[in-house]
Amino acid sequence: MARTTTPFSFQSTASEVLAGVDLSGKRAIVTGGASGIGLETSRALVNAGAEVTLAVRRPDAVQEIAHGLRAGGRGSVHVAALDLSELGSVHRFAAQWSGPLHMLVNNAGVMAIPDLEVTAQGWELQLATNFLGHFVLANGLHEALKAAQGARIVSLSSSAQLLGPVVFDDLHFRFRAYEPLAAYAQAKTACVLMAVEATRRWRHQGILANALHPGAIATNLQKHTGGLKTPVERRKTAQQGAATSVLLAASPLLQGIGGRYFEDCNEALVMDQRTADFTGVAPYAVDPANAHRLWEMASHLVNMQP
């Protein structure tokens, strides 16, 4: 399988990636689409003509942002309530959606929560929010994605996937000691595996999924880590951080490509060990057997809920 490369790079911005791309008539959902790189992803898609729904926890708080996006872009903007850590909220969001969905950008997330927190189902919060909530969302929107006849799912991961695999025998830290970054690493590895298995299951229905590392961008995501620690020369702006997201969501350069992990607008190399600069993707994060196992486990967890 040939590695996918593009003319874009570390410095590229979301608007550069979508220059000349017309998304009129296309519909997108961006979770967490009103702040950070989610906002810049939404902006680029709206500017290219897409109809974008900002799926956020507090819709009332982002109406001014939505108005600004409408005023500056060619597309349209909607706001809807979605709390990925609360299953009822995810089910309600999916049930209220009607018509085809061309782009599902699973952007929202939490990072390095200091102490172990669990959802009402007993799920570790980072795994629940970053992966399981998006898993339920994608499955709930499956028919809408299928109806688009060429849909794309974008799964926001992180270079943190290089810090550790999914620990299948103890997903929720019920036996091992909780460690914030280990939980984050597991959740972000799970996001990559979701893209691998979603593509395998749904490719024949015209649905493709890819995962990505957006880069080091100073946002609210680092509120539990004391801010961004990455050296200045390796940091990106939010516009640069959104570039790989919109590449995977809408660029014709990714036509027919699925089940892969990207960074800096190009497919990452699979590494045999972690490097000092945290580039590439770990083999366990793109392993088809791991992806299948995680999907089955997630389906079991979700189906057990009332």
Image: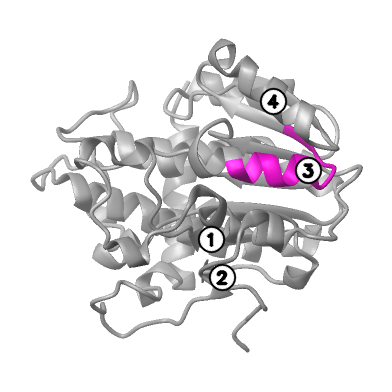
Query: What residue would you read off at disc 2?
Result: 260
Label 2 – label 1 distance at C-alpha: 6 Å
Q: Amino acid at mark 3?
A: Asn
Contact (CB < 8 A) between labels 3 and 4? no
Viewer can see residue 202: no
Q: Amino acid at mark 1?
A: Ala
Query: What residue would you read off at disc 4?
Result: 68
Label 4 – label 2 distance at C-alpha: 33 Å
Mark 3 or mark 4: name the one nearer the start of the chain. Answer: 3
The answer to which quarter of the image holds residue 27 is top right
Mark 4 or mark 2: name the one nearer the start of the chain. Answer: 4
Query: What residue would you read off at disc 1?
Result: 211
Q: Give the label, 4 or 2, closer to the camera.
A: 4
Q: Give the label, 3 or 2, closer to the camera.
A: 3
Mark 2 or mark 1: name the one nearer the start of the chain. Answer: 1
Location of residue 304 with respect to 263 vertically, above or below:
above
Which residue occupies 74% across, 35% down? 52
Contact (CB < 8 A) between labels 2 and 1? yes
Frontmost residue, 205 versus 191: 191
Query: What residue would you read off at disc 3?
Result: 47
